[in-house]
Image (cartoon, rainbow, N blue to C red):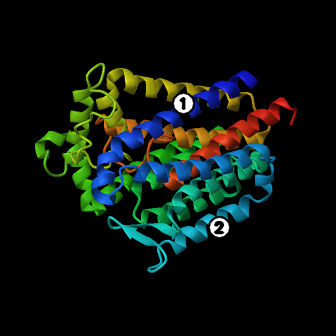
Amino acid sequence: MRDIRFTFFASFVILMCLGTVMIYSSSGVYALETMGNSMYFLLRHLMFMVIGAVLMWMAMVIDYRILQKYARPILMLALVMLVLVLVPGIGKISSGARRWFNVGPINFQPSEYAKVALIVYLADFFSRRRAVIRSLWRGFGPVILIMGCMCALIIKQPDLGNTVLVASITMSMYFVAGGRKSVFAAIAALAVPVLTILIIAAPYRVRRVVAFMNPWEDAQGAGFQLSQSQIALGSGGFWGVGLGRSIQKLFYLPAAHTDFIFSIIGEELGFLGALAIIVLFGVFIWQGTRIIRNTADSFGYLLCTGIMVMLSIQVVVNIGVSIGALPTKGLPLPFISYGGSALIFNMTMAGLMLNVSRTQDLGG
């Protein structure tokens, strides 16, 4: 699988490089105005990249099967952190959400670690219990309990985007592991009314859904982000207005360097630039699926499956939100968006994918 690894890694590196350039381009003016230093977010992003590179290297060189031995402690640590972040005085509040710990210069988001911990735990659980995976009590019961606890803690922050992502990862891995199709279909059907209730329970979520239906009806209110995102993409045309020449990043489009960085890419680099990003992600995901298909080890197979489901959903949702195909959700674009915890753990997951692939080549 050497050629697969090379293409997988090459697409990852190119995405990281493009992300670094676009973070500086999209955040420079905002950083100068708010932080007094146009390179503030770029320097922090580079710091996160260094941390992520160290963890990625560690994930590549250790025997990934060691994780299976510590799957339960890894999951328990995640649940404990999700509880602690909700405690006043421990968790940091920003924009009305309590999702972060202050760890020196880094705002650590435990839900990002929780997704990784969940994937490791489920890969271990399903690989050990393949014989009873179709049993509702022994195969599905523990899984739905863990998923329910984690989703309840994350929605309390509140963070609907990562809640849906956790549920999607869990059910996808259950299905791939050989779970009952009827159970999968039942949970998928049940998710619709549950999601509806969660949206109705929070007025700001209702406003987001209404704005998604027609952002231009309230372009200065609830539909502001989506309308500004579409203006950015439309302004770019085929060739783009030029790197660094975005107008929307000048305090028009909120979260230009985080959730809506794809819109700035479309404005500055045009349709060709946006298409290049999509193609690179397509290559990355395709090579990731080839690694999965060539993995004989059950734990490694399910581990890589969970990783690719997590990254793929984030790509689809982030780009879907930017182009107005999905309601606004706070999920970053992997390897491109500014964001400490997400970048660090996404890089670590890419390292685990390469580790699994290399181990298979070595006859592991």
As rendered, which of 322 and 29 lies closer to the eye? 29
As rendered, which of 226 and 26 lies closer to the eye? 26
The relative height of residue 323 versus residue 121 in the rendered view (above or below) is: above
Dot placed on the residue nearer the N-terminal end, 2 or 1: 1
As rendered, which of 284 and 46 lies closer to the eye? 46
**Residue drawn at point x = 69 percent, y = 32 percent:** 292
Q: Which residue is mark 2?
A: 77
Give left or right: position of 146 versus 34: right
Q: Which residue is mark 1?
A: 14
Q: Which mark is residue 277?
A: none
- Of circles 2 and 1, which is in front? 1
Q: Residues within 10 Å of mark 1 (few under 14, many from 20)?
A: some
Q: Amino acid at mark 2?
A: Leu
Query: The C terminus appears in which quarter of the rendering?
Result: top right
Give left or right: position of 301 versus 9: right
The outermost residue toward the bottom is 89
Q: Position of residue 193 (x, y in %)?
A: 37, 52
The outermost residue toward the front is 37
**Residue drawn at point x = 46 percent, y = 55 percent:** 163
Q: CA distance from mark 2 to mark 1?
A: 33 Å
User: Is residue 9 in view?
Assistant: yes
